[in-house]
Amino acid sequence: MRQRIAMVTGAGSGIGRAAALALSEAGWAVVLAGRRRDALEETAALAPEDGRTLVVPTDVTDENSVGSLFVETRRVFGRLDLLFNNAGANAPAIPFEELSLAQWNAVVAVNLTGAFLCARAAFRLMKEQVPRGGRIINNGSISAHAPRPFSAPYTATKHAITGLTKSLALDGRAYDIACGQIDIGNAATPMTERMANGVPQADGRVAAEPRMDVADVGAAIAHMASLPLEANILFMTIMATKMPFVGRG
């Protein structure tokens, strides 16, 4: 059997790194995309010794940079079987009326436009390659279902990702392209360390929240990726069991 080729954006840390390592351990060759070469190379160094990785520094908000990412992927591997659209950004947790247009646009550029640019390039390649098809997994967020205080840009873009996921799942049917979404709650990464000390709650309190091992998120993504193209997990929610999401917290 031929080796399957995956691409992970935002692969230099956190969820992207966990997903890339889980896929590598499952036998995938993995294209590591992200802004910082040094962080991507750290991820590559953590992969299994027999794992195959390709480091491609990329700015997902730049059309030419994304184009170069896919040109290099095609040059080295000839195809792409999986795109994990993971790169993301957030704005400062400040009152909505204090958000600047620049802060809003920065989140939209990474979370939404970046996902669009990568998915569009993946669609083009997956339609042309032989055998045809592939899978796209978008990183959504449970914040789109239950937003945190002062999170309008992030929450709005993650709502939009859900619409993108549904549209890609529909438009990809004719070309054997499956699309699903994973919504993640409180994975233990450097970005969520503040939760151990307390984060604002909907009722105005500040409370610590439980987190889960980010490796379990990587395993969930690898499971979604392992399915044959005849099957698709359209939406998966993986969360710290005791985090305040369902009910009143």
Image (cartoon, grey):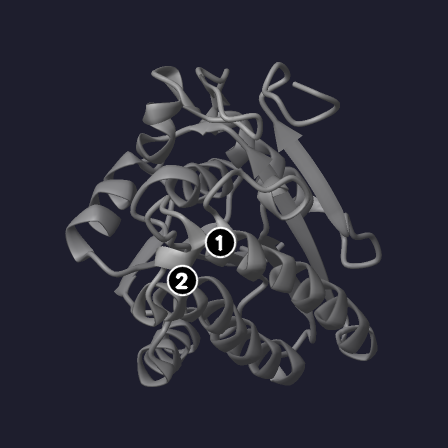
Q: Residue furthest left?
A: 38
Give me the disc on residue 154.
1
Residue type, mark 1 in image = Tyr
Residue type, mark 2 in image = Val
Looking at the image, residue 106 sits to the left or right of residue 240; the answer is left
Q: Secondary structure at mark 2?
A: helix
Q: Secondary structure at mark 1?
A: helix
Which residue is at a point 57% across and 59% down the rendered structure image?
156
Residue 104 visible within the image: yes
Whether residue 194 is situated above or below residue 16 in the rendered picture: above
In the image shown, does 165 or 163 lie closer to the viewer?
163
Mark 2 burial class by Cα count in 10 Å: few <14, some 14-19, many 20+: many
Give me the disc on residue 130.
none
Are discs 1 and 2 less than 8 Å apart at CB? yes
Quarter of the image with the C terminus is top right
All told, the count of numbered labels is 2
Choose the circle earlier in sequence order: 1 or 2: 2
Looking at the picture, how far across and down is residue 226, in whole percent?
67, 45
Which residue is at a point 75% across and 23% down the rendered structure image?
247
In the image shown, does 30 or 241 lie closer to the viewer?
241
The answer to which quarter of the image holds residue 184 is top right
Looking at the image, residue 194 sits to the left or right of residue 1; the answer is left
In the image shown, does 238 or 137 lie closer to the viewer?
238
Residue 32 visible within the image: no
Which residue is at a point 35% across and 71% down the rendered structure image?
101
Mark 1 burial class by Cα count in 10 Å: few <14, some 14-19, many 20+: many
In the image shown, does 42 or 89 lie closer to the viewer?
89
Which residue is at a point 24% across and 39% down the rendered structure image?
45
Q: Which residue is mark 2?
A: 107
